[in-house]
Amino acid sequence: MGCSSSLSQKHAHVSLPLSETQKSLVRETWETIEQHKNAVGKKTFLRFFDLNPDNQKLFPEFKDVDPAELENTTALYGHAKRVMKAVENAVSSLDDAFSFAAYLEELGRRHKARALKPSYLDAMQDALMNTLKDLLKSQWTKETEEAWNNLFRFISTTMIKGLQSQ
């Protein structure tokens, strides 16, 4: 009982840093992204590793895989799919920041063992934003970019809270 009470107080005043217009932009563009989410996840990871080759070593399941062969591995597909599921959860939770924040903090705690650093989340955000820009083309406006950036900053900040928790 004490746990749920402290959880309620911990996340009672959580709100996403997005306006209603930004939430609408995220939802609208997600309709396109969702149709390609597995490819988006894979392309994001490939871009993340291309821009930061040493980061591939952070992932035990594909740290020893030749970068040229990585795209076709089930390990990359699986991790990319899990990351895109988290993005899907973000979109479906735009009006329920309380539950989403609890999920993200737990996700951050689960990444402690991998020694996740905030800079890795920043690099992943950059890779994902560029992948979304490539996919969305004319739908990718300055306003859309700002909306997705705000959402991913919330994701990163909240995951970092989980990383730093005891």
Image: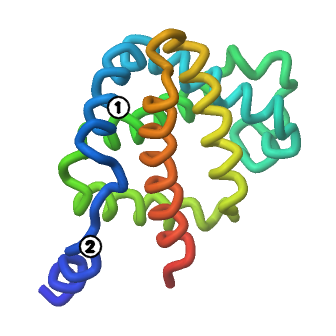
Q: Is residue 32 above or below residue 63?
A: above
Q: Position of residue 141 (x, y in %)?
A: 49, 23
- 52 in relation to 15, above or below: above
Crowdedness of circle 2 by 10 Å Cα count: few (<14), some, many (20+)?
some
Please identify the residue farthest to the bottom as the structure is shown: 2
Q: CA distance from mark 2 to mark 1?
A: 23 Å
| In this picture, residue 60 sits left or right of residue 110 | right
Q: Is residue 160 above or below residue 31?
A: below
Residue at x 35%, y 31% (from the top left corner): 26
- The percent coordinates of residue 96 (x first, y second) are 19, 53
Residue beneath label 1, please?
26
Q: Residue at x 46, y 48 (%)?
A: 150
Mark 1 belongs to which amino acid?
Val
Q: Earlier in the sequence, mark 2 or mark 1?
A: 2
Residue at image point 32% right, 55% down: 16
Q: Position of residue 78 (x, y in %)?
A: 53, 30
* Quadrant (top left, top right, bottom left, bottom right) of the N terminus: bottom left
Amino acid beneath label 2: His
Residue 62 placed where, x, y %? 74, 35
Secondary structure type for disc 1: helix
Tell me which corner region of the image, top left, top right, bottom left or bottom right, holds residue 63: top right
Disc 1 packing (10 Å; few <14; some 14–19; many ≥20): many
Image point 15% across, 84% down: which residue?
Answer: 5
